Image: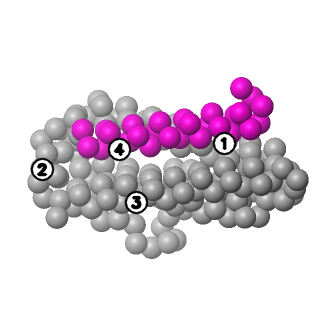
Amino acid sequence: MGKRARELVEASGIDVEWLINELNKAFADECIAFFYYNLLSRLIKGVEASILSRELAKMANRRLKHQEKILQRILELGGEPLKRFDDIPKLANCPYITIPDNLADLRAILKAVLEAERCSINIYSKLLDNLVSAGRDPITLQLIREILREEIEHEQALEQLLGEK
């Protein structure tokens, strides 16, 4: 699996090994974000926690979908996905989210998650720029654009919850 897809990407001028490595990094980022968002959606406390909990659960589910799509693309390219859990934080672009000690401090939690979303936006923007300048791979370009759009939507939702916009 992946031979023809790999040939098409190579013919477009993109180094497939570089692309697979970048996709594995993005996969690691999505795994970490899913873990933190899912965990926080269940741990946060306070009167207004239910609203944020629902939003974090939705964001976690989107991160899980991103993982699946990125993993599928790695396989389509004939790549080797990450298999060891301890490789995830080593390879991730955005390896940690600072969880506040006070799980009732919803503002601090929102800021931590917003920082993570902004890191994702930066990573996907750079990946998109590199893909566009390296050559044309319409499948990966579409995937990264779709994920970037969703990350921007997450950022906007978090800013609204913080009252920043």
Name the residue that disc number 3 marks: 68
Q: Quadrant of the C terminus?
A: top right
- Marks 3 and 1 sit apart, C-alpha to C-alpha, by 23 Å
Name the residue that disc number 1 marks: 115
**The stretch drawn in magenta includes residue 155:** yes
Magenta region, residue range: 138-165
Q: Nearer the viewer, mark 3 or mark 1?
A: 3
Name the residue that disc number 4 marks: 143
Report x, y in % for residue 60. Answer: 58, 56
Name the residue that disc number 2 marks: 7
Report x, y in % for residue 37. Answer: 64, 57
* Label 4 CA crowd tier, 10 Å (few <14, some 14–19, many 20+): some
Q: Residue at x 30, y 31 (%)?
A: 132
What element does badge 2 sit on? helix
The residue lying toward the viewer, choosing from 7 and 73, is 73
Q: Is residue 43 above or below residue 104?
A: below
**The stretch drawn in magenta includes residue 99:** no
Q: Quadrant of residue 130?
A: top left
Report x, y in % for residue 91. Answer: 47, 58
- Marks 1 and 4 sit apart, C-alpha to C-alpha, by 22 Å
- Marks 3 and 2 sit apart, C-alpha to C-alpha, by 22 Å
Amino acid type, callout 3: Glu
N-terminal of the pair, mark 3 or mark 1, is 3
Farthest residue, direction top: 165
- Marks 3 and 4 sit apart, C-alpha to C-alpha, by 11 Å
